Image (spheres, grey):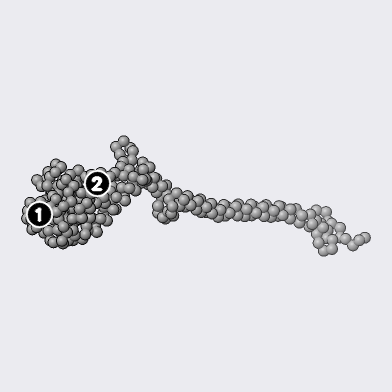
């Protein structure tokens, strides 16, 4: 006999070495499902970790892409406009506005209109490609402004053709005194002040077109200031002493150059008897 205790019928299995003989089989039946459950749990946790990692990566990548697009947009706006767009500006609207500004205001037929600049009668075309015309108009305007703004009080007006000065024939502040040429002496009746209202004054009276007539040959005289168009003159960039309302010039009668030669109104012709400078 081996010393094993035989099992009783209907009773518990016999012990071997102090343990039940059927226990390993029962342990195997219990551990199998547990291992399978653990494997499923591990797989589930792995899948969740993968999904979480993928979502985080996508979330982090998206702002980076948006930043890149914004940078390209900024570069495009800078390249189109010649400068960086402001933080609140719309580059598309700015580019559209720049194009509209470059073309100038639209006329009734939808085309760009001409803008008047420079001296009377000078029209510079804007938005039609006539850059030369626009530049010339602006240059003439600046020249005219510089000439008038540089005029000081008590200056003599000297004729290019005669080198003589404009003076009041009465040599006093007499209303209706004709203007004439005479040797420059710096007397009060030869001194003139250019006013901001367009008048040219001497001894408190204004240079005036007699009877407010626009007819060639009308006398230029000294008269009481009244603010009328017949007393609006300017020395323009071409050295014409011109009435700004009718665009006619102060002219020496018969192109004379001697003392006593009278002044009259005449169409501007750019001749020496119509050109003047200040002394």
Q: Which residue is mark 1?
A: 169
Q: Position of residue 162 (x, y in %)?
A: 20, 53
Q: Which mark is residue 112?
A: none
Going by the image, does 69 lie left or right of 12? left
Name the residue at 9% across, 45% down: 211
Q: Does residue 79 appear anywhere in the picture?
A: yes
Name the residue at 69% across, 53% down: 39
Q: Earlier in the sequence, mark 1 or mark 2?
A: 1
How far apart in space, not on screen, are marks 1 and 2 (Cα)?
25 Å
- 62 and 244: which is toward the camera: 244
Name the residue at 14% across, 43% down: 217
Q: Could you tell me which quadrant the N terminus lies in?
A: bottom right
Q: Which mark is residue 270?
A: 2
Going by the image, does 47 lie left or right of 3? left
- 23 and 253: which is toward the camera: 253
Q: Residue furthest right?
A: 1
């Amino acid at each position: 006999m081996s010393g094993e205790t035989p099992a009783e019928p209907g009773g518990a299995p016999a012990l071997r070495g102090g343990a039940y003989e059927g226990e390993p089989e029962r342990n195997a039946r219990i551990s199998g499902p547990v291992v399978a459950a653990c494997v499923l749990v591990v797989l589930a946790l792995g899948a969740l970790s993968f999904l979480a990692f993928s979502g985080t990566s996508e979330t982090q990548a998206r702002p980076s892409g948006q930043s890149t697009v914004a940078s390209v947009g900024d570069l495009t706006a800078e390249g189109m406009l010649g400068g960086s767009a402001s933080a609140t500006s719309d580059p598309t609207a700015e580019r559209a506005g720049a194009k509209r500004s470059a073309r100038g205001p639209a006329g009734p037929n939808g085309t760009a209109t001409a803008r008047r600049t420079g001296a009377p009668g000078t029209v510079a075309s804007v938005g039609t490609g006539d850059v030369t015309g626009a530049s010339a108009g602006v240059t003439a305007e600046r020249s005219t402004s510089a000439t008038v703004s540089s005029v000081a009080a008590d200056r003599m007006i000297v004729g290019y053709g005669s080198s003589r000065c404009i003076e009041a024939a009465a040599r006093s502040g007499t209303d209706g005194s004709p203007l004439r040429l005479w040797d420059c002496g710096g007397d009060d009746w030869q001194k003139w002040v250019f006013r901001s209202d367009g008048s040219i004054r001497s001894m408190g009276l204004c240079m005036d077109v007699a009877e407010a007539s626009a007819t060639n040959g009308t006398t230029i005289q000294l008269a009481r200031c009244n603010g009328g168009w017949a007393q609006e003159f300017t020395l323009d960039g071409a050295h014409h002493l011109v009435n700004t309302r009718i665009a006619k010039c102060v002219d020496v009668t018969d192109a004379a150059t001697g003392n006593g030669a009278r002044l009259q109104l005449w169409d501007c012709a750019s001749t020496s008897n119509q050109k003047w400078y200040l002394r």
